[in-house]
Image (cartoon, grey):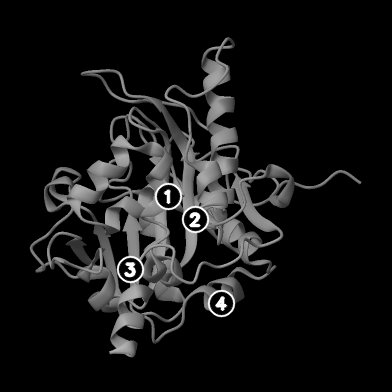
Amino acid sequence: MTWAILALLATAPGWCQMAVPQRSTVGIARAEQILVPEGIRAPAILYPEGRVHYGVVTALLDRAVAAAVGMDDPDAAWRAVVSPGDRVGIQIDVDGIEAHDPALDVLVRRIVAAGVPLRNITIYAGQESALFRAGFDLSGRVPGANVMASDDLGYRGGISRVVLDQCTTIISLSRLRVDPHFGMHGALANCLESVPHTERKRLERDPERLAEAAANSTLRRMIVLHVLDAMWPITSYPVGERPEMWQYGGLLASTDPVALDVVGRQVLLEALRQADPGCAALDPPVTWLEPATTEFRLGNSDSTAIDVVEQWPLDPDGQPPEQPD
């Protein structure tokens, strides 16, 4: 009976809360140009919005991840994050990422390059209908990574069985964007994709409790890396129009979701101030960062305890420019 009670408590948010690390690291890699210059390699008639340079996106992801885990060699960094025997879940922000999203495509390739078979990779988000609208194939007949919704297999202990039964390790991939419900969507908000629909809606209505989903002991143990796509942060969602975006040209990565969101918020505020010099803060404000540290012990919200490792901006070929002597 004692062991059964302990097992039940271990699945509850807040059980065996870990200490906040003294310092956290956020890796940032930026590029001057994400798109292939218009010309014979990217004719405007075929690519009216531009053609993404996948070599640059790969370099961005490699450099951000290597910085986040404190390594110089990207291949060694990926081997430190995942191993060939893992069944890797990629938790995605389905409202900010598309089926053929460059960051998602490159992330899958790098996981495979680290030795994980494609059949052992599962891309998932909360609802099947949202995945369908985003253009993901849910038939299971197309070769490639598995695509599933958290709702597909039901839930146990407040977490999707997709997480519990299909994955041993999770990488969270979110898109930096303004959210009309709780100010900003980032690494912590992305964990809503792993909890039941009713729980997602409850936490969206109570932003100060937003980090509660990420605080689930199973989820916090399984997520080994958070990646924040800030190549084109979404600064607003005009009703009936396309979202407004700003080219920041960067990918951010960290093992600390709170620190990552703190830095992401600074990037988003910079974008908003450029669009509107009078902008002082996000509306609605981001109220869940401090409780994520003080109550849920998920990471550092104090910017003085966060080491930001910025890579030199990459040139259009994905290489760092020559440094001045």
Q: Name the amino acid type tagged 4.
A: Ala
**Residue assigned mark 1:** 211
Q: Earlier in the sequence, mark 3 or mark 4?
A: 4
Residue 27: image location, x then y, percent: 63, 54
Task: Decide: few, some or many residues near mark 1? Use Cα within 10 Å; few <14, some 14-19, many ≥20.
Answer: many
Q: Earlier in the sequence, mark 1 or mark 4?
A: 4
Q: Are the residues flagged by discs 3 and 2 in contact, CB closer than 8 Å? A: no
**Residue assigned mark 2:** 296
Residue 166 falls in which quadrant of the image? bottom left
Q: Nearer the viewer, mark 1 or mark 2?
A: 2
**Residue assigned mark 4:** 80
Residue toward you, 230 or 47: 230
Q: Earlier in the sequence, mark 3 or mark 1?
A: 3
Whole-Å distance between the Cαs marked 3 and 2? 23 Å
Residue 240 falls in which quadrant of the image? top left
Q: Are the residues flagged by discs 3 and 1 in contact, CB closer than 8 Å? A: no
Whole-Å distance between the Cαs marked 3 and 4? 16 Å
Q: Are the residues flagged by discs 1 and 2 in contact, CB closer than 8 Å? A: yes
Q: Residue at x 54, y 25 (%)?
A: 271
Q: Is residue 6 above or below residue 289?
A: below
**Residue assigned mark 3:** 89
Q: Secondary structure at mark 4?
A: helix
Residue 183: image location, x then y, percent: 42, 30
Residue toward you, 38 or 271: 271
Q: Is residue 61 left or right of residue 172?
A: right
Q: Looking at the image, can residue 93 be seen? A: yes
Q: Residue at x 31, y 51 (%)?
A: 192
Whole-Å distance between the Cαs marked 4 and 2? 26 Å
Q: Nearer the viewer, mark 4 or mark 2?
A: 2
